[in-house]
Image: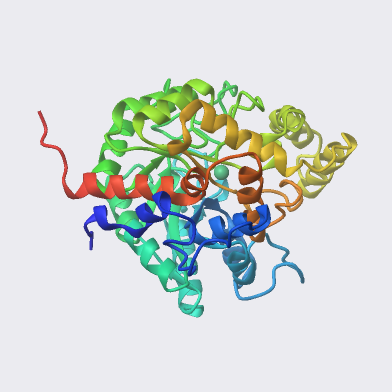
């Protein structure tokens, strides 16, 4: 059920003093508190939202249980219950990402993407049932605020890549009914209705110069449903087509800044300004291959390199992976410092404004050590708050970046769906 959004506690959290709302902390830090104490109070009072976490893959493919310690054992993860709590997470979008295995490119071959996405959603639901005291599914901004008050982490569903809807508005609606609250229109490959940034150079792929008419229909249907349109991964043309079509604010659930690291997955300043005009939010990705300028150069050439290796070793995928890893290691890159990520946040704030920036970690969707040093897993979120405060950002601004902005946008999409504007 949708509630009156004017009363949402996260709005108070975003405007009031630290400790005043949201996290339920009794009061702010004592007078004369250290920077660390003040940062802890700001973080505790905020509703921290991670826009993109890929732990779902480990849950589905490796039987990982969030109650397990993901720092030990066979499956090493960035995410588990203990570390979600240590990171002060109020809400996390678990990605329902369906990879290419389920959508064969051979004409006439049957897609299993819809079924696979349903199975992934069922696996997330099973995790929330297995850990009812720690986790609960949320579908509205009000749900998130309510769960925060009861000390639970709100789990939201984000569908990554448009393939699971199998070109069907009915299936899109089915995902919304199952609780999916955003859809990233593409992953690394172009769909039949939207260009991806991931294969623009591939002459074998049929591109559409952005969104097709059907792609625009999908965006309008998402607006009608109250499902957020996610522009991470899409080609620049698709991005601008989405912004020209969507009536609701849109999100980039896990995209960094292109001015600081030149990769087509990142947002240009023009895109950041357009997102701000649209009222949306750019949630910055933590992957060091997208935030570190030199690593981004190498990441850009990885697909090409992989293709060459696949031609050399067509039947030996393990060899291809080993060669890629060795090639990476040969660059001798050091870990990327946390400061680099905060540079991306600051740049986005300068260009788009503090009301349009958020966090989208991509934890468990990237290699284990390819995240900033000091932000090694979901327990590391408070380090971002500390660094922003140290650089002079206000508690109010930080609270918006940590999650207030995403919740505002989700609430706006819900409001538009509940009270659609009358067509001209
Ligand atoms: Zn992604």
Is residue 124 positioned above or below 396 on the image? below
Q: Nearer the viewer, residue 185 or 39?
A: 39
Residue 167's spot in the image, x, y percent?
35, 42
Camera-side residue: 421 or 398? 398
Up the image or down, 386 lies above or below 115; here it is: above
Residue drawn at point x = 61 percent, y = 39 percent: 392
Could you tell me how many numbered marks the image carries?
Answer: 0
**Res 327 → quadrant:** top right
**Location of residue 168 in the rendering, given as x and y in whole percent from the top left corner:** 31, 45
Q: Position of residue 68 (x, y in %)?
A: 65, 75
Residue located at (59% from left, 70% from top): 81
On the rendered structure, is 291 left or right of 214?
Answer: right
- The residue nearer to you, when weighing 127 against 78, is 78
What's the residue at 69%, 29% (across, down)?
A: 300
Q: Is 189 above or below relative to 25? A: above
Residue 28 in percent (x, y) is at 52, 61
- How are the colours assigned in the image? rainbow
Is any atom of residue 266 visible in this view?
A: no
In the rendered image of this protein, does residue 390 appear above or below residue 47?
A: above
- The residue that appears at 47% across and 29% down in the rendered structure is 352
Q: Quadrant of residue 334?
A: top right
- Is 71 in front, or is 111? 71
Task: Give ligand 1's quarter of the image.
Answer: top right
The N terminus - image quarter: bottom left
Q: Quadrant of the C terminus?
A: top left
Residue 65 in sight in this render: yes
In the picture as drawn, the residue positioned furthest to the front comes out as: 31
């Amino acid at each position: 059920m949708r509630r009156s959004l004017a009363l949402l506690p996260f709005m108070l959290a975003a405007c009031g003093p630290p400790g005043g709302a949201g996290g339920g902390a009794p009061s702010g830090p004592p007078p004369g508190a250290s920077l660390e104490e003040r940062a802890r109070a700001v973080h505790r009072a905020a509703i921290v939202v991670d826009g993109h976490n890929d732990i779902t893959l480990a849950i589905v493919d490796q039987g990982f249980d969030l109650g397990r310690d993901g720092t030990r054992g066979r499956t090493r993860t960035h995410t588990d219950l203990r570390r979600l709590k240590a990171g002060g997470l109020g809400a996390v979008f678990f990605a329902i990402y369906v990879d290419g295995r389920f959508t064969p490119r051979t004409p006439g071959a049957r897609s299993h993407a819809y079924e696979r996405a349903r199975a992934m959603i069922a696996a997330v639901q099973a995790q929330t049932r297995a850990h009812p005291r720690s986790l609960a599914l949320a579908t509205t901004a009000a749900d998130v605020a309510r769960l925060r008050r009861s000390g639970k982490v709100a789990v939201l569903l984000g569908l990554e890549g448009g393939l699971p809807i199998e070109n069907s508005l009915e299936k899109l609606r089915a995902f919304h009914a199952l609780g999916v609250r955003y859809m990233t229109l593409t992953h690394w490959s172009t769909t039949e209705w939207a260009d991806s940034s991931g294969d623009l150079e591939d002459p074998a792929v049929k591109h559409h110069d952005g969104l097709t008419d059907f792609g625009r229909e999908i965006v309008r249907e998402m607006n009608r449903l109250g499902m957020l349109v996610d522009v991470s991964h899409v080609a620049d043309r698709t991005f601008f087509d989405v912004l020209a079509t969507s009536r609701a604010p849109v999100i980039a659930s896990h995209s960094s800044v292109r001015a600081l690291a030149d990769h087509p997955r990142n947002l240009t300043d023009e895109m950041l300004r357009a997102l701000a005009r649209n009222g949306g939010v750019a949630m910055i990705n933590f992957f060091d291959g997208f935030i570190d300028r030199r690593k981004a150069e190498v990441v850009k050439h990885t697909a090409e390199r992989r293709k060459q290796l696949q031609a050399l070793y067509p039947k030996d995928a393990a060899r291809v992976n080993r060669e890629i890893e060795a090639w990476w290691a040969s660059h001798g890159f050091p870990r990327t410092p946390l400061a680099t990520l905060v540079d991306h946040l600051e740049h986005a704030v300068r260009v788009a404004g503090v009301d349009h920036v958020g966090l989208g970690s991509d934890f468990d969707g990237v290699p284990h050590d390819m995240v900033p040093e000091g932000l090694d897993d979901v327990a590391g979120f408070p380090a971002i708050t500390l660094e922003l405060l140290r650089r002079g950002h206000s508690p109010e601004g930080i609270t918006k970046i940590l999650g207030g902005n995403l919740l505002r946008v989700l609430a706006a999409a819900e409001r538009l769906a509940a009270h659609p504007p009358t067509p001209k």
